[in-house]
Amino acid sequence: MICDWGGSVLKQAITNLGSRTLDALWTVGLAMRFFVTVLLHSGMAFRRFGLTIRELYFTGVLSLIVILVSGLFVGMVLGLQGYETLQTYGAEESLGIVVALSLVRELGPVVAALLFASRAGSAITAEIGLMKATEQLSAMEMMAVDPLARVVAPRFWAGVISMPLLAALFSAMGVFGGYLVGVQLIGIDEGAFWSQMQNAVDFERDVLNGVIKSVVFGIAVTAIALFEGYDAPPTAEGVAGATTRTVVTSSLVVLALDFVLTAFMFRGIG
Amino acid sequence: MNKTKLDLWVGLFVAAGIVALLFLALKVGSTSALNSAEGYEVIARFENIGGLKPRAPVKVAGVVVGRVADIQFDDDNYEAVVTLRLDKRYAFPKDSSAAILTSGLLGEQYVGLEAGGDSVKLKEKDRILITQDAVVLENLIGRFLYDKAQEGAPQ
């Protein structure tokens, strides 16, 4: 009897695991198909660029404040922490290198993408999910307006364009924050701060790779946000769940992609 | 199409983003102009390059005039073959010498060029004949200890 009961529980657990895995694979496949369909439908986003500009305002301009302020604080913290450690080696002047490299290579693209996911990504998901729940998307289809081309594609391209710009602003603001703390507050020599930084930071290897990273993150975060919104069950609960999933999934994807990209770009050679 | 306030904000945002990129490119980083095709390559052979890495600077009188383009190992002579890419603006005598030096006590290693007196200049694919290896700290300490022991022994 007991043995039989245990067997059914085990069977249930395996069935659950299997169906969850299948569901997850199904979603991944659906998301990929959605991504390709959006790319194929993005003609209108460029032909009527006004649509994309409108979305640039909502994803880019409205994320500016949070990006700039966090960039400044991250840079200032890097300045303080970097100084604490470098001081023990008598290499305070290298603070510029520490601040600039960590921002341009990693923190700029990654933290900007995480903030972007929670600021703009969640808004995109909620908006599209609500449009679906209130049957605005179906209404568009009725009027022979393709919602993928009219609603989804402009948001996608706006996200892809604004992400590298936001990451660059974050890094620039962070360097300025590091400068404020290092040079103005602690009193490191200004010339050494900038010149060491310029010697160590290479445009192609560091700045350009950072930009490439942020473009990839922009594509990933926006695509996830749009898919979650489009795929959300058309209920209040469904939209709420989808918004949460956007932030969680895109944060995880950004961090995982960051590892992959870093492994490609900096593998300890040169 | 009529202009709206929204367009202005987006324009401002894009402009700020591009300014930030330019700031990162020009003020924070240095463009690797020396890394591009505008230059010529010369080869130097060393018995020991220490911690020299590709992209390390090549300096003359403290001024960066090029970068290490490539490091290979020659298993006929058991030597390191270091390819230096020099800025085409500068020409150096054919009998110049190359040494592997360290900036500061713990700093990175770089190649120091010392100009010679020849009137013929170095050209693409030329070889720098006179080279000086990197100083290996262990060897230096070993020699120092050996000398100390020698000093003490005869008395």
Image (cartoon, rainbow, N blue to C red):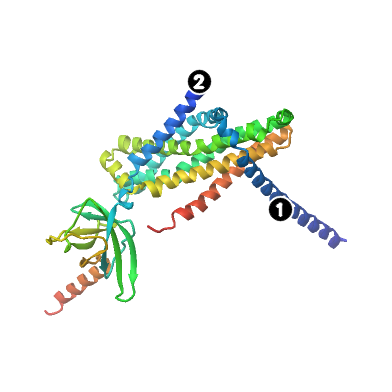
**What is the number of the mark on residue B5?**
2
Work out which residue is located at the far right of the displayed protein and give it. A1
Q: Position of residue A23 (x, y in %)?
A: 72, 49
Q: In this view, does B20 lie above or below A12?
A: above
Residue A133 located left or right of residue A197? right
Residue A79 located left or right of residue A235? left
Kind of residue indicated by mark 1: Thr
Badge 2 marks a residue whose secondary structure is helix
What residue do we see at 48% from left, 39% from top? Answer: A164
Q: Is residue A247 above or below residue B1?
A: below
| Picture quarter with the C terminus of chain A | bottom left
**What is the number of the mark on residue A130?**
none
Q: Where is residue A55 in the image (x, y as percent from the top left)?
A: 56, 30
Q: Chain under label 1?
A: A
Quarter residue A10 falls in: bottom right
> Is A215 or A178 nearer to us in this picture?
A215
Which residue position is annotated with label 1?
A: A21
Badge 1 marks a residue whose secondary structure is helix
Kind of residue indicated by mark 2: Lys
Quarter residue B124 falls in: bottom left
> Is B152 or A259 nearer to us in this picture?
A259
What is the distance, in whole Å, between disc 1 and disc 2 at their CAs? 48 Å
Residue A80 located left or right of residue A262? left
Residue A105 can be seen in this image: no
Residue A219 can be seen in this image: yes
> Is A155 or A80 nearer to us in this picture?
A155
Given this view, does label 1 or label 2 mark the residue nearer the observer?
2
Q: Where is residue A90 in the image (x, y as percent from the top left)?
A: 29, 49
Q: Counting other residues with Cα less than 10 Å from the Cα at mark 2, is it few (<14), some (14-19), or many (20 or more)?
A: few
Quarter residue B118 falls in: bottom left
